[in-house]
Image: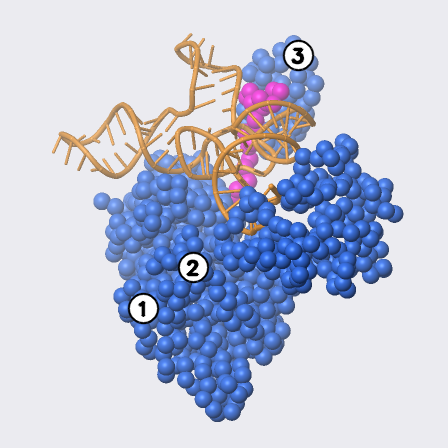
Chain colours: A blue, B orange
RNA sequence: GGGCGAGUGGUGGAAUGGUAUACACGUUGGACUUAAAAUCCAAUGGCCGAAAGGCCGUAAGGGUUCGACUCCCUUCUCGCCCACCA
């Protein structure tokens, strides 16, 4: 029989709730700590990933609390999204009711875990009092020209007459009806995140407490590349083709140009040429290809000669213009200069189509154009490059660009990978975009006083015929705010990433009715001191949140430009080496684990199994081990080590029969405080727990030999405090059982005494030629001469160095000696 | 194809230039018990040896160092991100 976790956990959860233990308020003169974990999508049940994420956060929140910080630790739900709508289609029910049901269930589960949230601040993005502010922010962006309409293609199922997310397109077919998906152009809303690209890149430098790889992923996503735009005149017209290159040093090796199939000048070039029809067919074939199908480098590059020629401005050479599918309209200028000798893609294409290859960068081992088997993309010396021949290419790169700017041949440019953010979704379950279309006035913003534009109560969910919102007549028909004639509402809703791009601000003033948040609250709590969540949000969510923050700062609503000071990305929870998922059927349900072992066991196990950032493998055996450990510490209570209120926080020194054990335990107490504190600060929860296990082993060992001493009571007391952020319920229970008043959560965090930790003697490791041969116990700070004398007279060491001269005698103070012979 | 990260006992992991395998799981043996569970004790990288002890050992190979899991180079494997980005 183990300890009664069911009763204990229920009791303390009720206590914390009754005492409003984790409710906080803005207290300008108290040091704050804002700890945020990524809020969940309410799919119905929490999974182990959530448990891990929120347990990591909870340990830190409770620890910071005990250190005296005013800790904001909120939780909410990212409640809009497709699963609710799909559930509604399946059962023809209301996505609202489905979502609220899921939220209730998940809140119940989160409470069972004993997380220290301030539940009075809970938010759900699907409630009008929240999404009103999505619309408000959208309108501010619209005013600033940062929200605009543009045609963009969507995946479209002609049978269901509906748009599909990429994940709903399975092998080019609709996931529901299996018919072929086509690309369809729709007018859609975009946010001009590209207006902030330089700031988004620049400010990454300040995010020193973010994981390196997240910074790198953001950097790659922004994708800035520096290069030169070069202007190629056409042979027989005044038209100019602009190409972008990062390798302007290879310009003398350009032997042809390539246009993307969508390039606007292409039709002009081929007009009236014999191959016109063939090329038009080619263009149409390539453009209708679903974008997801073609698979990069593996895919063979297809293209044709257009019949046109361009003039290379650096040497007036005539070069042919081609069209090929390996050039993308979306990047750069949609046209490239092809240098087959120094670009692998160009090389393959040139060989396929018998186009000339000309080496203009010579490598150390001499290369010949005719003998190349692959492009040479490395550095070297310019050859056949006019006045730049003989220069190292890196130097030539700079000089050629300069020369081009002076002569008007080209200009230095940056190109970015980042695109504007498409936020329109042809879906019901999202924030309505607050826009009205009037035949007379055009696109009109919904006036602020009319917000929120609420989702209608009822809609029909069939999965066919477009968005359900588009068929709710009472929603669509409205009056133009400007001219008062009849008008139509926008029926698209916002992508849910919009909702989560500013939710961390709403937690500060969740009840605010006039603005999205109160300035005084936000300026106290923000930025978030520690953000914790999955690596899958390393790019989009974090980038969008940074964008919103910068935008709100420009509006003058906030004073900071980065929302998250520190970031921790936790690893995934695996079972049998695979990610837990419904489709694999390898889910372990947290609820069932809590039933059988308790929340404390689950918390302890999930922290002990691996460091937070690493992936962890679920093991039922390991879980049982954690449970066993909790039983083991709980048994300390039953051994009658209760303390009286008089004992207080001091460690009493009393003469004891077992002086050595006493001193050892005292030192262990302070070593453990040190280790656990440092490990929590650096998120090494697994080793923090290991050190507490060692501590417990030591307490038991000493208890065997010297029963019922005050030092043991003190050790247990410290143990209970140290372990309380990890396993709060059992810690509270033990605290009371042992005679403590108040609660353990209200105890200050213990401080170690470095004097007590100090050792008087050191066990020196003695190596001979780098191999451990002996260990000698010596007083601390033994002089080197004395050390040498003792070590060389050691019997074991003597047998190793006999008759061999000592070449070197290396001393690492208070640690190790290495004798080289 | 490019970038990043990782590879340590039967297992999860510890040690980031100084005793490799802390802590835990598992396994084996023992104590307690009529029995089981629970608990407690002991052993647990490999090889040689009766023992003392020795040799080998952190994916593979090489290098730097008095000393390398740790730093450098080469190779292999796995994971993640990006990917026809000019």
Question: Residue B48, located in which quarter of the rendered image?
Answer: top left
Query: Which chain is home to disc 3?
Result: A
* Viewer-proximal residue among A407 and A309: A309
Name the chief secondary structure element in magenta: strand
Q: Is residue A782 above or below residue A405?
A: above
Label 2 vs label 3: CA separation?
A: 83 Å
**Residue for point 55% across, 35% down:** A760
Q: CA distance from mark 1 to mark 2?
A: 18 Å
Which numbered disc covers residue A462? 1
| Chain letter of disc 2 in the image | A
Q: Quadrant of the N terminus of chain A?
A: top left
- Residue at the far bottom in the pictured view: A484
On whether disc 2 and disc 3 are found on a single subunit, the reply is yes
Q: Would you name the residue on which mark 3 appears?
A: A804
Residue drawn at 75 percent across, 51 percent down: A319
| Closer-to-camera residue (A159/A64) | A159
Label 3: few (<14), some (14–19) or many (≥20) C-alpha neighbours in 10 Å: few
The percent position of residue B78, horizontal first and vertical second, equals 48, 38
Query: Which residues make up the magenta segment?
Result: A755-774
Lower position in the chain sequence, tag 1 or tag 3: 1
Residue A271 falls in image quadrant: bottom right
């Amino acid at each position: 029989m183990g300890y009664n976790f069911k009763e204990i956990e229920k009791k303390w959860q009720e206590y914390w709730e009754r005492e409003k233990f984790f409710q906080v308020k803005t207290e300008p003169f108290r040091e704050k700590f804002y700890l945020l974990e990524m809020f969940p999508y309410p799919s119905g049940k929490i999974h182990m990933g959530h448990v891990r994420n929120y347990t990591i956060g909870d340990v830190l929140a409770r620890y910071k609390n005990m250190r005296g910080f005013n800790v904001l630790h909120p939780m909410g739900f990212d409640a809009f999204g497709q699963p609710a709508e799909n559930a509604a289609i399946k059962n023809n029910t209301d996505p609202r009711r489905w979502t609220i049901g899921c939220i209730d269930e998940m809140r119940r589960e989160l409470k069972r875990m004993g997380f220290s949230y301030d539940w009075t601040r809970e938010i759900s993005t699907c409630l009008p009092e929240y999404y009103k502010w999505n619309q408000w922010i959208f309108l501010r962006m619209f005013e600033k020209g940062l929200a605009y309409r543009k045609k963009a293609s969507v995946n479209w199922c002609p049978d269901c007459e509906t748009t599909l997310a990429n994940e709903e397109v399975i092998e080019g077919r609709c996931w529901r009806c299996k018919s072929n998906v086509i690309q369809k152009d729709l007018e859609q809303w975009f946010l001009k995140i590209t207006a902030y690209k330089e700031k988004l890149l620049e400010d990454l430098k300040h995010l020193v407490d973010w994981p390196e790889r997240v910074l790198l992923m953001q950097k790659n996503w922004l994708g800035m590349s520096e290069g030169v735009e070069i202007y190629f005149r056409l042979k027989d017209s005044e038209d100019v083709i602009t190409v972008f290159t990062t390798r302007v040093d290879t310009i003398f090796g350009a032997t042809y140009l390539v246009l993307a199939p969508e390039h606007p000048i292409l039709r002009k070039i081929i007009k009236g040429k014999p191959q016109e029809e063939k090329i038009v067919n080619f263009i149409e074939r390539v453009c209708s290809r679903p974008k997801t199908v073609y698979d990069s480098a593996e895919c063979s590059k297809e293209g044709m000669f257009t019949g046109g020629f361009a003039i290379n401005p650096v040497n007036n050479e005539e070069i042919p213009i081609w069209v090929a599918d390996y050039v993308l309209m979306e990047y750069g200028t949609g046209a490239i200069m092809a240098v087959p000798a120094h670009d692998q893609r160009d090389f393959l294409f040139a060989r396929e189509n018998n186009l000339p290859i000309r080496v203009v960068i010579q490598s150390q081992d001499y290369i010949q154009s005719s003998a190349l088997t692959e492009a040479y993309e490395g550095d070297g010396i310019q050859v056949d490059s006019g006045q730049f021949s003989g220069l190292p290419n890196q130097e030539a790169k700079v000089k050629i660009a300069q020369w081009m700017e002076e002569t008007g041949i080209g200009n230095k440019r940056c190109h970015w990978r980042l695109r504007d953010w498409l936020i329109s979704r042809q879906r019901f379950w999202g924030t309505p975009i607050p826009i009205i279309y009037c035949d007379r006035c055009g696109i009109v913003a919904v006036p602020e006083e009319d917000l929120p534009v609420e989702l209608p109560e009822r809609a029909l969910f069939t999965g066919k015929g477009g968005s359900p919102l588009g068929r709710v007549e009472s929603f669509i028909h409205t009056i133009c705010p400007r001219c008062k004639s009849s008008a139509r509402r926008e029926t698209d809703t916002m992508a849910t990433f919009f909702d989560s791009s500013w939710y961390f601000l709403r937690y500060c003033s969740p009840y605010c009715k006039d603005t999205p948040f109160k300035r005084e609250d936000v300026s106290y709590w923000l930025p978030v001191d520690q953000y914790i969540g999955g690596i899958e949000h390393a790019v989009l969510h974090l980038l969008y949140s940074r964008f919103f923050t910068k935008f709100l700062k420009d509006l003058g609503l906030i004073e900071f430009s980065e929302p998250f000071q520190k970031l921790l990305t936790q690893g995934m929870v695996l079972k049998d080496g695979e990610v837990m998922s419904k489709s694999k059927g390898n889910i372990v349900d947290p609820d069932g684990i809590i039933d059988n072992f308790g929340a404390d066991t689950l918390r302890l196990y999930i922290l002990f199994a691996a460091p937070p950032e690493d992936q962890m493998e679920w093991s039922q055996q390991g879980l049982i081990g954690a449970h066993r450990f909790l039983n083991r510490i709980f048994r300390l209570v039953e051994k009658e080590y209760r303390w009286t209120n008089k004992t207080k926080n001091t460690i009493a020194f009393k003469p004891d029969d077992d002086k050595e054990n006493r001193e050892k335990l005292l030192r262990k107490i302070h070593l453990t405080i040190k280790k656990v504190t440092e490990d929590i600060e650096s998120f090494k929860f697994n080793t923090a727990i290991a050190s507490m296990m060692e501590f417990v082993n030591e307490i038991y060992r000493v208890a065997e030999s010297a029963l019922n001493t005050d030092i043991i009571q003190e050790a247990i007391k410290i143990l209970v405090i140290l372990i309380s952020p990890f396993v709060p319920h059992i810690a509270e229970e033990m605290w009371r059982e042992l005679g403590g008043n108040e609660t353990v959560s209200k105890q200050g965090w213990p401080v170690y005494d470095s004097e007590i930790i100090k050792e008087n003697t050191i066990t020196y490791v003695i190596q001979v030629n780098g191999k451990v041969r002996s260990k000698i116990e010596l007083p601390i700070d033994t002089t080197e001469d004395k050390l040498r004398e003792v070590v060389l007279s050691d019997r074991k060491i003597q047998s190793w160095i006999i008759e061999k001269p000592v070449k070197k005698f290396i001393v690492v103070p208070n640690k190790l000696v290495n004798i080289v012979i």
